[in-house]
Amino acid sequence: MSRSTFTPDLESATSRADEQQLHIALNDGTRIPQLGLGVYKTPADETAEIVRYAAKAGYQMVDTAAFYGNESGVGDALQDFPDLYAVTKLWTQDMGYDKAMRAFDESARKLRREVIDLYLIHWPMPKSGLAVESWKALIKLKNDGRIRSIGVCNFQQEHLTQLIEETGVKPVLNQIELHPAFQQRELRAFNDSLDIRTEAWSPLGQGGGLGGEIIAGIADKHGKTPGQIVIRWHLEQGNIVIPKSANPKRIDENLGVFDFHLDDDDMKRIATLERKDGRTGPDPYTADF
Ligand SMILES: NC(=O)c1ccc[n+]([C@@H]2O[C@H](COP(=O)([O-])OP(=O)(O)OC[C@H]3O[C@@H](n4cnc5c(N)ncnc54)[C@H](OP(=O)(O)O)[C@@H]3O)[C@@H](O)[C@H]2O)c1
């Protein structure tokens, strides 16, 4: 794992007004900040300071997972920023009713939170056949008041349909790989049809898609950076978005997206960036962890 050169300077982080940021209504009556900080691959021993820096800068949500190995660092930061909306995920090896219950306890202990704002099943793992049992555990934890909202990641249409048919409970959101090279139009529309919000992971294409001419041209036009254009593109479509950065300059940069809009022409040009080989992560049907 590469090491970042993060040197926190909490004093230099300037807090942005709450009202600049948007919230998205979820189908269980709660609301989620539309922009958060992702911490996949953020080094465990730097996570607390990075999350503290981001919270001070104005981030209102943090997205971690048991799999990322940095929940304890997030938990340390949550002690100082108790209002930060905290998201974590059930790993594939912990699926099943009893294992999910234990895994949740462990995540809550590391996050040092009595109540987790949002808990997600990380992958559907269709071959395991354990998604529905895991979902029943999440429903119980929500009914017991341990989790405010429950959702999923990487679920395809048939996985969502099965979950809802067998339990009658809809996820509040589906967190999926989504960026200009992989726009997921069909799955987004399916999520919408069920009143399930779409959250974009790898929203910047892991930084890979930011060097192209189209994004650069739109960035010049608005006096913004390519990263800000892509984050704004997500916001315009109603996606919840969790760009990861472990670099203070880019943590600030990625928050500078609430003072401009993309126009129809910008949106049409970004729509052309979809690629057949645009997926960068595992295929949810065949993922094997
Ligand atoms: N549910 C799932 O299965 C799943 C899978 C993957 C990810 N996720 C979540 O989604 C979050 C985001 O996805 P991701 O981390 O894969 O990728 P990403 O956010 O698309 O990209 C992160 C990469 O882009 C760089 N970067 C950040 N801001 C930038 C900017 N403004 N300009 C240029 N480069 C920039 C980062 O480097 P620096 O750190 O050096 O800035 C890092 O290398 C994760 O952290 C995680 O919370 C969920």
Image (cartoon, rainbow, N blue to C red):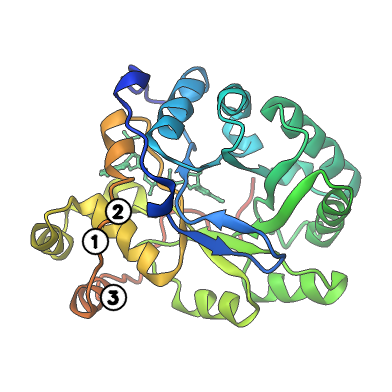
Q: Amino acid at mark 3?
A: Ala
Residue topped by disc 2: 257
Q: Between 204 and 267, which is closer to the camera in this rendering?
A: 267
Residue 75, relative to residue 214: is it above or below?
Answer: above
Q: Residue at x 89, y 48 (%)?
A: 144
Point out the image quarter for the C terminus: top right
Measured as percent of width and height from the top left, residue 8 is found at 36, 18
How far apart marks 2 and 3 lie (CA) works out to 19 Å
Q: Picture quarter containing residue 135?
A: bottom right
Badge number at residue 271: 3
| Left or right of 235 in this view: 287 | right
Q: Amino acid at mark 2?
A: Val
How far apart marks 1 and 2 lie (CA) works out to 7 Å
Splitting the image into four quadrants, where does ligand 1 fall?
Answer: top left
Measured as percent of width and height from the top left, residue 107 is found at 72, 33
Q: Earlier in the sequence, mark 2 or mark 3?
A: 2
Residue 176, relative to residue 36: is it above or below?
Answer: below
Measured as percent of width and height from the top left, residue 21 is found at 41, 53
Point out the image quarter for the N terminus: top left
Whether residue 107 can be seen here = yes
Badge number at residue 260: 1
Instruction: State which mark lies toward you, 1 or 3.
Output: 1
